[in-house]
Image (spheres, rainbow, N blue to C red):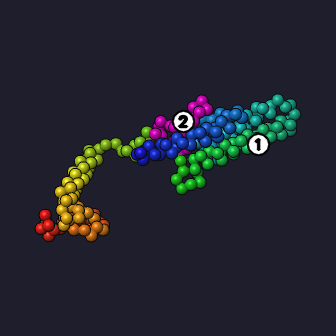
Amino acid sequence: MTEFDRIVKKHANEIPCIQKAIDTLIEVGLTVTDEDFLSLAYEGARLREQAVSLATKEAEKFKISFRREQEKENISAEFFRVIETAKHQLRKALKSDFSNPLSPTAYHIQDGKVYLSTKWEEEMRLQCDPEETEARKKAKVLMNKAIAAIEALNAFVADNPYLGKGVTSSLDDRRCLIWIDGDGNIHREDNNLKFI
């Protein structure tokens, strides 16, 4: 599994938990857009504004002003309680209190349903697998040649009882033809050619 696939799967696995939080908000009459979702991942200010607006409309049926204000406060308080519950569920799903939380921008809300954002997926793809440049192409060719040469040299001495490896590291104390130290410097052991 590539790094990109691992990241996408990690985010996709949390969709049911996030959907549950969104459903809680929708059930009480709140509308959740991508902006509302991002706001909820932090403080939820946009949803609180929407809640106050809905509470104000609902309280309009009371003619007496103090009764209207009291009802508005009661309705708002209930909305705020639901928003806080949803915010807690969302932060838990996003693992916000962990050192490597999930990204809230990874999700897209459409008609009350949670999906992975195609824009986020494309950004992740570019981060995990950068665009091919001429320099990267050349680096890949050189890497492939180096790997092929090392594998060929190791295969060449594989049956030799006097050599442990064709190419090895400084941690390997067996006799070899080439070894690489901890700093990545390459050292030839021409004296060991006598064992071939």
Viewer-closest of 62 and 110: 110
Going from N to C along the chain, the mark reached first, 2 or 1, is 1
Residue 152 in the image: x percent, y percent? 20, 54
The residue to which callout 2 is attached is: 115
The numbered disc on residue 77 is 1
Residue 57 appears in the picture as rendered: yes
| Count of numbered labels shown in the rendering | 2
Residue 117, magenta (yes or no): yes
- Relative placement, left or right, of 169 versus 104 is left
The quadrant of the picture occupied by the C terminus is: bottom left
Of the residues shown, which amino acid type is indicated by label 2?
Answer: Tyr
Mark 2 is surrounded, within 10 Å at the Cα level, by few (under 14), some (14 to 19) or many (20 or more) other residues, namely some
Q: In this view, does 114 lie above or below 185?
A: above
- Do the numbered discs 2 and 1 sit on residues whose CB atoms are within 8 Å? no
The numbered disc on residue 161 is none
Viewer-closest of 56 and 37: 37
Residue 5, magenta (yes or no): no
The quadrant of the picture occupied by the N terminus is: top left
Image quadrant of residue 109?
top right
As helix, strand or loop, the secondary structure at mark 2 comes to strand
Magenta segment, which residues? 103-121
